[in-house]
Image (cartoon, coloured by chain):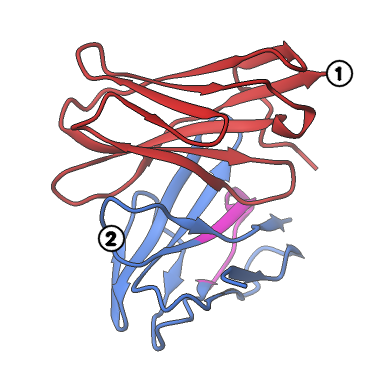
Amino acid sequence: EAQVTQNPRYLITVTGKKLTVTCSQNMNHEYMSWYRQDPGLGLRQIYYSMNVEVTDKGDVPEGYKVSRKEKRNFPLILESPSPNQTSLYFCASSPRQGPVPLHFGNGTRLTVT
Amino acid sequence: GESVGLHLPTLSVQEGDNSIINCAYSNSASDYFIWYKQESGKGPQFIIDIRSNMDKRQGQRVTVLLNKTVKHLSLQIAATQPGDSAVYFCAETGASNYKLTFGKGTLLTVNP
């Protein structure tokens, strides 16, 4: 089944403790992206990747890092999480960046205390 | 946990009625538009898309209308069912970099 898989689905952590949210897609997509979703603000792009080893900042990149060493994986790294990063995170992919739909994972709900 | 549906405009319809969800966009250069459905606890799911060279596109029980003059997009759902209850949001992208910009969404509730 074609899908975008995120792990974990739920994560509670404390301020300053480094964490990684994994994202994997099995559709051989070139383009991958991370979003955060907050009430009243909608989906905002954190980082995106056009292809392996090519990443760039989205609208809200502060406090986040990403890497794209393989085509299928695009982990999101929070080196020192803070409470304002408490949010619902989505990974998405598409065959390329262009007029094509994004395929989303089922989300990771992160709480930073 | 807090629902993504809080703080959103809401539309409540009776089962079997037609639903119309609206979206205004601001960028006159937007070239591509998508509607997504997001059910509680799930990621956004693609419904239908439309390019700016069209003003209407139909899918199964759904129709998207694009009015470029007033920068307005609508999603029509025919014979709405309880399973259609979700948050619906539009997204647009320009012709230059194709970065999607998402609307905040509308919560559709279907009453049996």
**Local SS, label 1:** loop
Report the label total.
2
- Left or right: where A111 falls relative to A49: right
Residue density around tag 1, few if under 14, some if 14–19, many if 20 or more, within 10 Å: few
Residue density around tag 2, few if under 14, some if 14–19, many if 20 or more, within 10 Å: many
Residue at (41, 88) in percent of width and height: A70
Q: In this rendering, is residue A50 above or below A46?
A: below
Image quarter hosting the C terminus of chain B: top right
**Residue range (magenta):** A77-91
- Left or right: where B99 falls relative to A88: left
Front residue of A24 and A46: A24
Any part of residue B16 in sight? yes
Chain A color in figure: blue
x, y percentage for residue B77? 58, 23
Chain for disc number 2: A
Whole-angstrom CA distance, mark 1 to mark 2, is 40 Å
Chain for disc number 1: B
* Amino acid type indicated by mark 2: Gln
Is residue B91 magenta-colored?
no
Is residue A88 magenta-colored?
yes
**Local SS, label 2:** loop
Q: Nearer the viewer, mark 1 or mark 2?
A: 1
x, y percentage for residue A49? 33, 70
Q: Which residue is mark 1?
A: B112
Q: Which residue is mark 2?
A: A97
Residue at (74, 48) in percent of width and height: B41
Any part of residue A78 in sight? no
Q: In this rendering, is residue B9 above or below A93?
A: above
x, y percentage for residue B90? 44, 33
Chain in red colour: B
Front residue of B41 and A111: B41
* Amino acid type indicated by mark 1: Pro
